[in-house]
Image (cartoon, rainbow, N blue to C red):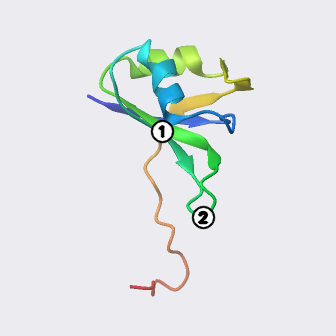
Amino acid sequence: MSKNIFVGSLAWATTSEGLEQAFARYGVVTSAKVISDRDTGRSKGFGFVEMDSGGDEAIAALNGSDLDGRQIVVNEARPREDRRGGSGRGRY
């Protein structure tokens, strides 16, 4: 079963490829994505990695480790919450 992993406190210079390389040591990486601001294209300082195998080992080994000069936070991603809020009448 695949595991979706949140990676926070990334250095601005960290790329999706660098993220994938860091996690590939622990198992099969299906995807790795550093999240960017849609207007500026600059990294938001976090990303997600999906792994087919080795996810638990990667979380244990990489949480608190150094990646590109920053101590990263690694944990299992939580499902996205509904962000509409308000009166329940969203824009459609």
In the rendered structure, are the residues bearing label 2 and label 1 in contact, judged by CB atoms less than 8 Å apart?
A: no
Q: Position of residue 69 (x, y in %)?
A: 73, 23
Numbered circles on residues, count = 2
User: Which residue is most to the left?
Assistant: 1
Single out the mark in the foreground, 2 or 1.
2
Q: Position of residue 57 (x, y in %)?
A: 45, 14
Q: Amino acid at mark 2?
A: Asp
Q: Position of residue 29 (x, y in %)?
A: 36, 25
Q: Nearer the viewer, residue 71 or 12?
A: 12
Q: Quadrant of the C terminus?
A: bottom left
Q: Amino acid at mark 1?
A: Phe
The residue tagged 2 is 39
Q: Does residue 54 appear to the left or right of 75 in the view shown?
A: left
Q: Could you tell me which secondary element the residue under label 2 belongs to?
A: loop
Residue 44 in the image: above or below residue 63: below
Q: Residue at x 46, y 83 (%)?
A: 88
Q: Quadrant of the N terminus?
A: top left
Pointer 2 local density, CA inside 10 Å: few below 14, some 14–19, many at least 20 = few
Mark drawn on residue 48: 1
Q: Nearer the viewer, residue 77 or 38?
A: 38
Q: Could you tell me which secondary element the residue under label 1 belongs to?
A: strand
